[in-house]
Amino acid sequence: MVTFDIQDGAAILTLDDGKANALSLGMSQALDAALDRAAAEARVVVVRGLAMPDEDVHAPNEFFRLASFDEGLRTWPMLLSELGKLSPADFGRRA
């Protein structure tokens, strides 16, 4: 449900339970566990998962809805705005 990868000190969490825009109890628990792990092992966390299940991203029959593209374009400014509110110290490792 949640894959965990670390790249250059960033924990990358990918949400994928086969349902678009759904946060089941199992997904919520998996995300909670991944965030706990990220707090211990990473300096920053990226959570992603905007594609629809039938888009088959990077598959031979791949396609991508323009609505999903628009959703991503709306998400990035919000993310950057929130990150801009943080000080450099907010990105340090917690004790």
Image: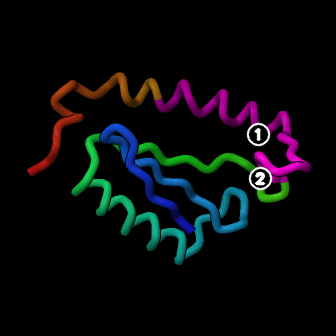
Identify the magenta region: 55-79
Q: Residue at x 59, y 33 (%)?
A: 75
**In the shown orientation, is residue 70 left or right of residue 17?**
right
The residue that disc 1 covers is 68
Q: How is the image coloured?
A: rainbow
Q: Quadrant of residue 38?
A: bottom left
Q: Position of residue 29 (x, y in %)?
A: 44, 73
Q: Are there few (<14), some (14-19), or many (20+) residues within 10 Å of tag 1?
A: some
Mark seen at residue 52: 2
Helix or strand or loop: what does disc 2 sit on? loop
Q: Residue at x 16, y 43 (%)?
A: 93
Instruction: Tell me which amino acid carries mark 2.
Output: Met
Instruction: Tell me which amino acid carries mark 1.
Output: Ser
Query: Contact, CB < 8 Å: mark 1 with mark 2?
Result: yes
Q: Position of residue 9 (x, y in %)?
A: 30, 41
Magenta residues: mostly which secondary structure? helix
